[in-house]
Image (tube, rainbow, N blue to C red):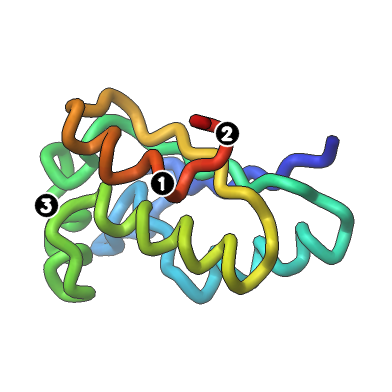
Amino acid sequence: MPLLHLRHRPRQAAPGRARDVHVARRGLDIARRGAALGCKEALITLGDKPEDRWPEAREWLDAHGYDDTIAYVRAMAIRILEETGLLPHLNPGVLSWTDFQRLKPVAPPWG
């Protein structure tokens, strides 16, 4: 089964840009192309709470109205499912029980 993998590594980030945060429009464009090519899932993977490691990530989340990376991942998972038909396959790092409960409804592979 084709799998679409969206990933932005910190070392690839340009100076001054938030690391580990995919801009929604770019991520959705990639997801749409993947769906057109027959992908069934979009893999969203990142390190543990990038906003705790990089000030740029915290600033980006604040500027875009997200409390934390989990809120952003949840919002993107919903958009990917609704706008592309791909199933969001989430791998957001270590999660608290509360964060797991926030993401489970938008992560079909989690059951």
Judging from the image, what secondary structure is the residue with disc 1 in? helix
> How much space separates mark 2 and mark 1, taking CA atoms?
10 Å
What is the crowding at mark 2: few (fewer than 14 residues within 10 Å), some, or many (at least 20)? few
Report the residue at 25% width, 50% height from top. Answer: 69
Report the residue at 55% width, 41% height from top. Answer: 108
Q: Quadrant of residue 81?
A: bottom right
Name the mark nearer the viewer: 1 or 3.
Answer: 1
Report the residue at 33% width, 32% height from top. Answer: 47
What is the crowding at mark 1: few (fewer than 14 residues within 10 Å), some, or many (at least 20)? few
Above or below: residue 10 compared with residue 16: above
Proximity of marks 2 and 3: CB atoms separated by less than 8 Å:
no
> How much space separates mark 1 and mark 3, taking CA atoms?
29 Å
Residue 47, numbered circle: none
Horizontal side of 94 relative to 26 (left or right) equals left
The residue that disc 2 covers is 109
> How much space separates mark 2 and mark 3, taking CA atoms?
31 Å
What is the crowding at mark 3: few (fewer than 14 residues within 10 Å), some, or many (at least 20)? some
Q: Position of residue 75 (x, y in %)?
A: 37, 63
Name the mark nearer the viewer: 2 or 3.
Answer: 2
Q: Position of residue 67 (x, y in %)?
A: 13, 59
The residue that disc 1 covers is 105
Kindly identify the amino acid type of the residue bearing the numbered disc 1.
Pro
Proximity of marks 2 and 1: CB atoms separated by less than 8 Å:
no
Report the residue at 35% width, 47% height from top. Answer: 20
Above or below: residue 61 compared with residue 102: below
Q: If you read the primary sequence from the N terminus, does the residue marked by circle 2 or circle 3 appear first?
A: 3
Judging from the image, what secondary structure is the residue with disc 2 in? helix
Q: Position of residue 71 (x, y in %)?
A: 25, 56
Front residue of 92 and 47:
92
The residue that disc 3 covers is 55
Judging from the image, what secondary structure is the residue with disc 3 in? helix
Kindly identify the amino acid type of the residue bearing the numbered disc 3.
Pro
